[in-house]
Amino acid sequence: MVLGNQLRLAQSDFEALRDSLLRERVLHELVAGEASLDRLAAGIGLQDTAELDRRCRRWFDVEAARLRAEALACGFDARRGGAWQIEQLPPAPQTCRALMALRYMEEANLDKVVEVVETDPVLSARVLGLAGSAYYGARKVRDLKDAIGRVLGFDELIRVATVLVARQALAPQDCPGFDLLALWTRSLASGHALAELLANTPAGRDGELLRLLGLFHELGLQALAHRAGPRLATLLRELDPSLDEASLRQEELRRLGTTRHLTGALLLARWGLPAEMVRALRQLDQLLADPTAPVPSAVMALAVLSRLFRLRHAGLAIEHELLALSGLLERLGAACAPDALAARLDAILEARQQQAEALLLA
């Protein structure tokens, strides 16, 4: 049964696989290579640079020259000894990529979702276990279809699968001091809070996209723990935990040659996730490099939430962040007093910590 599903998925996904391989090559050449855009387009069999730009807009939501310029402007130059940062990023997990593709298919249904999950026996077992866990109500589930359709739902399944697949594909290596549970607690909390606080504003029209953006926004840090563990461990050991995000970014750039958000954007682009998320992570990195950078309100709110939850999880003061977030929400027409906001965010953080523990420690 599982083998048959895998073969059907492989046959139906051939064009997507070709597209994925071409996307990865273009990404590597733009950020880690020196070929001109004309030579790059010709080398991969495209008609001209206009066709290259059309592909890049579809893959990365930005033209080829701008993607290369943004990477350089953020301080990332893989051509000067940092190519490992692209070359050693792991390939896209098939299950995660297939589930994300189904989310954007109008004809997707529960049977197709179950078919994808069944191709990964480890994920299947974890989904069944989680659906019956105390966090999800300790309900009895009959099978995988019941676990997904009645207990989790498709959107929650994608979030669960993301955490579980990333844990396997990006397992930290030789990185003492890196707290995987804290990272996913912050990420789950950031996504949930972002969607909840912006729900009644124009910036919150796609709440699930905001949840995914929060979920993915620090994935680059786990990628660095996976590929540059000893260097990241040294950095984490020596950093002041109260350091502001812009200074933290500068330290990452100086000592690791890249930043968590830029690495995350490159990783999501390589994995073929929606261009909106790739663009948002690039914008988040740009905002930390230049506080005057014109970025969407959701990205500004995510920057504040990410720092707020990092400080709160460490037991540090968050008054400044609460005031900043309250002011931003007021400008967006979703005013919330700092005291009430603090209570909401604490409740979100506590619930998401329980969820992260259920995902990672069970």
Image (cartoon, rainbow, N blue to C red):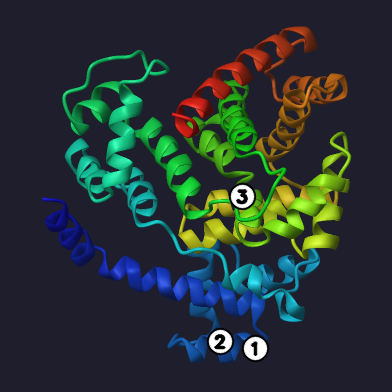
Q: Amino acid at mark 2?
A: Leu
Secondary structure beneath disc 2? helix
CA separation, marks 3 and 2?
31 Å
Residue 51 percent location from the top left of the image: 48, 78
Q: Give the camera-side residue of 323 and 311.
A: 311
Marks 1/2 in contact by CB < 8 Å: the verdict is yes
Q: Which residue is mark 1?
A: 36
- The residue under the point 53% across, 76% down is 26
Q: CA distance from mark 3 to mark 1?
A: 32 Å
Q: Where is the C terminus found, in terms of image quarters?
A: top left
Estimate the spatial distance between the alpha carbons at disc 1 and disc 2, rounded to whole Å: 6 Å
Q: Residues within 10 Å of mark 1 (few under 14, many from 20)?
A: few
Left or right: where 181 falls relative to 287: left
Q: Badge 3, how many Cα within 10 Å: few under 14, some, many 20+?
A: many
Residue 140 shows which numbered tag? Answer: none
- Mark 1, secondary structure of its residue: loop
Q: Is disc 3 placed on a helix, strand or loop?
A: helix
Residue at x-position 67% and y-position 18%: 334
Judged by depth in the image, the label closer to the viewer, 3 or 2, is: 3
Q: Amino acid at mark 1?
A: Ser
Residue assigned mark 3? 222
Q: How many residues crowd mark 2 within 10 Å: few (<14), some (14–19), many (20+)?
A: many
Dot 3 amino acid type: Gln
Horizontal and vertical percent position of residue 192:
56, 26
Q: Is residue 267 visible?
A: yes
